Amino acid sequence: MNKKLIFIDIDGTLTVPGSNIPPESALSAIRQAREAGHKVFLCTGRNLAMLSPVLAYGFDGAVASGGGYVLSGDSVLFDCPMTADQQEDALRLFAENGIFRTIEAKDASYCDDGMGEFMARISGGNSELLRWRKALEQDLGIMPIRYYDGRPIYKIVFMCEKREQLNPVRERLEGEFNFLIQDVNDGSYINGELVNRRFDKGSGVRLTAEHLGFAREDCIGFGDSMNDLEMIENVGLGVCMSNGSPELMKRCGMVCPPVEEDGLARAFEQLGLTGQA
């Protein structure tokens, strides 16, 4: 078979949300795929600091910060933080409208005080909510926002109770930023990501494929939520976890079992990536 370029989301796809430890079945499948000559990249909303513990298990690179920072081996292919004016406006507008913020620099993340309590009391949930709750509980390096020192920001994760709270923020920022709202079951909260329109996971996929000389039809993307949509739209085959977003599932050509049921390993085997199909 042709060599493949494989992109894997972390939270809810490679690991249970908020964890840094993939199942051994997934790590074994990834090792076998790389030994067979395929390239395997992480493709995640996490910044470099938060994905580094996973990257250390052995990957060829990463599309990080939702596409804002792209790494292939030791080469940085793309690096696009917010401008100083953009981040000042975004931080102020979210705060003024009572919206909780988790801000992500390349090498550090900071969270508003009170977000843990907010998440604990709201009902329902999806993998993104669980990711942030576990991140706070298990300390993935997210610091209180009072320690933020002004370093460049790549992405802001936001959470609030009512969609109307976002209206003033969108009015000011939507020309330059995408508001990627996660689909939730009961509407008891709104959570999403503020991402610069200059990039997304899809642009990171395209840049990586061009750099390594892979055609789109030889690219495969694995994800579980709607923030993986641009990745899925830019590969030849999209694979969604069976406990993932129903909307994303509709856009994918294949569905595999969840992380807890060795979904990634089973999909790699079915696709012949480990040489065992």
Image: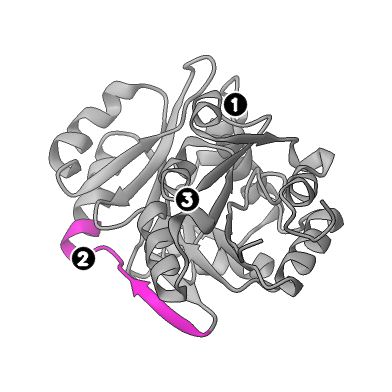
260 relative position to 247: left or right:
right
Magenta-tinted stretch: 74-87
Q: Amino acid at mark 2?
A: Thr
Does residue 41 lie above or below 186 as drawn?
below
Does residue 7 lie above or below 267 as drawn?
below
| CA distance separating discs 3 and 1 | 28 Å
| CA distance separating discs 2 and 3 | 30 Å
Residue at image location 76% in from the left, 45% down from the top: 270
Residue at image location 74% in from the left, 51% down from the top: 268
Q: How many C-alpha atoms fall within 10 Å of the one at disc 2: few (<14), some, or many (≥20)?
A: few
Q: Look at discs 3 and 1 and give the one toward the viewer.
A: 3
Q: What percent of the width, then of the height, locates residue 114? A: 50, 40
Magenta stretch contains residue 255:
no
Residue at image location 56% in from the left, 29% down from the top: 249
Magenta stretch contains residue 85:
yes
Q: Amino acid at mark 3?
A: Val
- Colour scheme of this structure image? one colour
Mark 2 vs 1, N-terminal side? 2
Mark 3 vs 1, N-terminal side? 1
Q: Which residue is mark 3?
A: 235
Q: Is residue 12 visible?
A: yes
Answer with the quarter of the image where residue 167 lies.
top left
Residue at image location 21% in from the left, 37% down from the top: 169
Q: Which residue is mark 2?
A: 83
Q: Which residue is mark 1?
A: 125
Q: What percent of the width, then of the height, locates residue 212? A: 47, 74
Q: What percent of the width, then of the height, locates residue 231? A: 45, 49
